């Protein structure tokens, strides 16, 4: 039997700490639940994230810094869905998340939602934001 299922973000280039700090600054009531960093003589560069678990909007997420160079990166095929309480919240969050990233679908009425937007952040992680 499966104990639990969590999203896992693998960052390349040692940017995991920057991404984690950024996400914690964007989402209120977010936190780091546990952090394991590589130490001297371990497989990854000292100080980079071996594994961390953090919480955003009640969702636990795992992440790490990969010290192996991979031929793949994040894709919008996986994204975080964020339910916003207001248009102001959606615009604030999407504006922050898109800084240095890209807007995939500008904020608008797409039929399935009166206000929706889809952005990639500067770390390549994809976010869909919606007003319920």
Image (cartoon, rainbow, N blue to C red):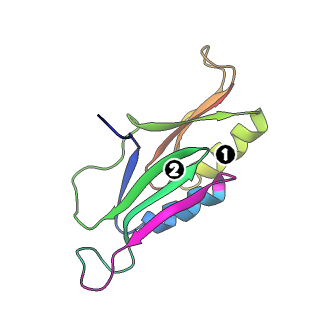
Q: Residue at position x 23%, y 62% from top?
A: 69
* Sequence-earlier tag: 1 or 2: 1
> Residue 121 got which mark?
2
Q: Specify the segment rendered in magenta.
A: 26-41
Residue 14 position by quadrant: bottom left
**Disc 1 element:** helix
Q: Is 68 or 97 nearer to us in this picture?
A: 68
**Disc 2 element:** loop
Q: Residue at position x 33%, y 76% from top?
A: 38
Residue furthest toward the bottom?
A: 40
> Residue 56 got which mark?
none
Where residue 78 appears, as percent x and y from the top left, is 40, 37
Q: In the visual, does 115 lie left or right of 2?
A: right
Q: Residue at position x 43%, y 61% from top?
A: 52
Q: Can see residue 28?
A: yes
Where residue 1 appears, as percent x and y from the top left, is 29, 34
Is 28 rendered above or below residue 15?
Answer: above
Q: Can see residue 106?
A: no
State the count of labels. Answer: 2
Q: How crowded is mark 1: few (under 14 residues within 10 Å), some or many (20 or more)?
A: some
Q: Is 98 or 52 nearer to us in this picture?
A: 52
Q: Name the residue under label 1.
A: 93
């Amino acid at each position: 039997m499966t104990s639990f299922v969590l999203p896992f973000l693998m960052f390349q280039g040692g940017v995991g700490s920057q991404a984690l700090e950024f996400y914690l600054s964007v989402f209120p009531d977010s936190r780091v639940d546990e952090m394991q960093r590589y130490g001297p003589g371990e497989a990854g560069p000292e100080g980079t994230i071996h594994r961390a678990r953090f919480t955003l909007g009640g969702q636990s997420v795992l992440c790490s810094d990969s010290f192996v160079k991979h031929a793949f990166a994040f894709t919008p095929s996986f994204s975080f869905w964020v339910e916003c309480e207001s248009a102001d919240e959606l615009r604030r969050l999407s504006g922050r998340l898109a800084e240095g990233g890209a807007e995939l679908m500008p904020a608008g009425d797409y039929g399935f939602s009166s206000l929706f937007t889809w952005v990639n952040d500067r770390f390549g992680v994809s976010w869909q934001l919606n007003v319920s």
